Amino acid sequence: MPDDRTTHRVSFHLRRSRPAVAVVGATGAVGRELLRVLAERQFPLAELRLFASRRSAGATLSFAGREIAVEPLSEASFAGLDLALFSAGSAVARDHAPHAVRCGAVVIDNSSAFRMDADVPLVVPEINACAIETHRSIIANPNCAAIITLMALAPIHRRCRINRAILATYQAASGAGAAAMQELLDATRAHLAGAPYAPRVLPHPYAFNLFSHDTPIDPETGCNGEETKVVNESRKILGDPDIRVGVTCIRVPVLRAHAIAVTIECEHPIDPAEARALLAEAPGLRVVDDRAANHFPMPSEASGRDEVLVGRIRRDPSDPSGRSLALFAVGDQLRKGAALNAVQIAERLLP
Ligand SMILES: NC(=O)c1ccc[n+]([C@@H]2O[C@H](COP(=O)([O-])OP(=O)(O)OC[C@H]3O[C@@H](n4cnc5c(N)ncnc54)[C@H](OP(=O)(O)O)[C@@H]3O)[C@@H](O)[C@H]2O)c1
């Protein structure tokens, strides 16, 4: 980490138990969810300041019954602030997080800018909360598909190490931001009306369609950026550089909540009932696994909820050794995959 991003901290805690907080990217899909989560969880606040680009000049956002003006972000924005929740993309994080840190704030960043930096903790509180204590003023919130996948895998991994995980994602529009959600609505309306619609945000027609994740493909490996993030971040969060992970990331026409189909191969045989019991007692998870009713996790039931839903827990019939299980997880990536996870980290920073 460059020196100008670090400050000497005597404690991993914030300076005050009622901190002054900034939300950077407040007008975006994650930013608006951050405001909802901060209000719902009654996060203690001395002051809340909202920042976005110059495009949002003059806008206000409501928070806990009052209107707050959105300010354009500048180098001077962070004076007097204790905590900055960034959700404005990697470029903004790289440019502005160092200013926040120099002002004495702790940054929790939702972008991928710092996630793989060796001295930046990458945290899912239910999995590796202790990493928070090692921060040097910047903490990274992981990729949303990684968070939802690992919420379902970590309880099993802790008991019976997972050697290998093969997964396919079904990722919602909201993962690409507020404009992509609007594009899904507009494209669907146009399709139903029989009208032409030219995609503006995502690269392909979105109504009644799905396509390979819109991050760039590495020409050598054939993997896209999202897939690479899930692989690398899974290893870092689990603290297991040897876990083998293979991923195919797909964008589906769902407004919010990502779904992930996973097959795991453990070091030892594991019974589906044992896995179900481990998942049932894990914090932040809800088992939805009703074979009789054919009722399993769905984006419609995960949307707006804090818990990651997990089900379809069964033996993988292609592995007679009994070491492999298949399961299906769904989580609202604007909440647990982004805003909620960030606020949970912030709560652990309170002195
Ligand atoms: N969406 C998800 O599910 C999800 C999950 C995990 C992580 N993330 C990450 O969170 C970040 C935000 O994602 P999002 O989905 O909320 O995107 P979004 O809906 O497109 O919102 C982007 C936000 O960033 C602001 N912004 C853009 N350029 C800026 C600048 N130069 N200065 C200040 N603010 C600027 C925008 O302000 P204006 O409104 O003024 O343009 C807006 O508030 C991204 O890094 C994304 O990868 C997203």
Image (cartoon, rainbow, N blue to C red):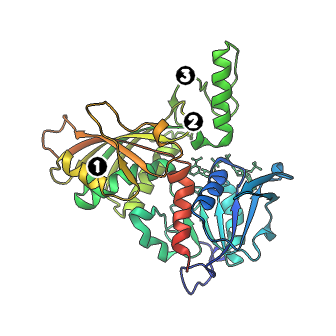
Query: What amino acid type should be assigned to the residue bearing mark 3?
Result: Phe
Mark 2 and 3 residues: CB-CB less than 8 Å, in contact?
no
The residue located at (64%, 43%) in the rendering is 177
Q: Secondary structure at mark 2?
A: loop
The residue at the far front in this view is: 65
Q: Does residue 146 appear left or right of residue 177 in this picture?
A: left
Q: Is residue 37 above or below residue 329?
A: below
Which residue is identified by label 2? 255
The residue located at (70%, 71%) in the rendering is 100
Q: Is residue 122 visible?
A: yes
The residue at the far left in this view is: 321
Q: Is residue 183 above or below residue 226?
A: above
Which residue is identified by label 1? 164
Q: Secondary structure at mark 1?
A: strand
Q: Position of residue 331 (x, y in %)?
A: 46, 46
Please state which of the two labelled residues, at mark 3 or mark 1, is closer to the viewer. Answer: 3
- Callout 2 crowding tier (Cα within 10 Å): few <14, some 14–19, many ≥20: many
Which residue is identified by label 3? 208
The residue located at (27%, 46%) in the rendering is 264
Q: Does residue 244 appear left or right of residue 63 in this picture?
A: left
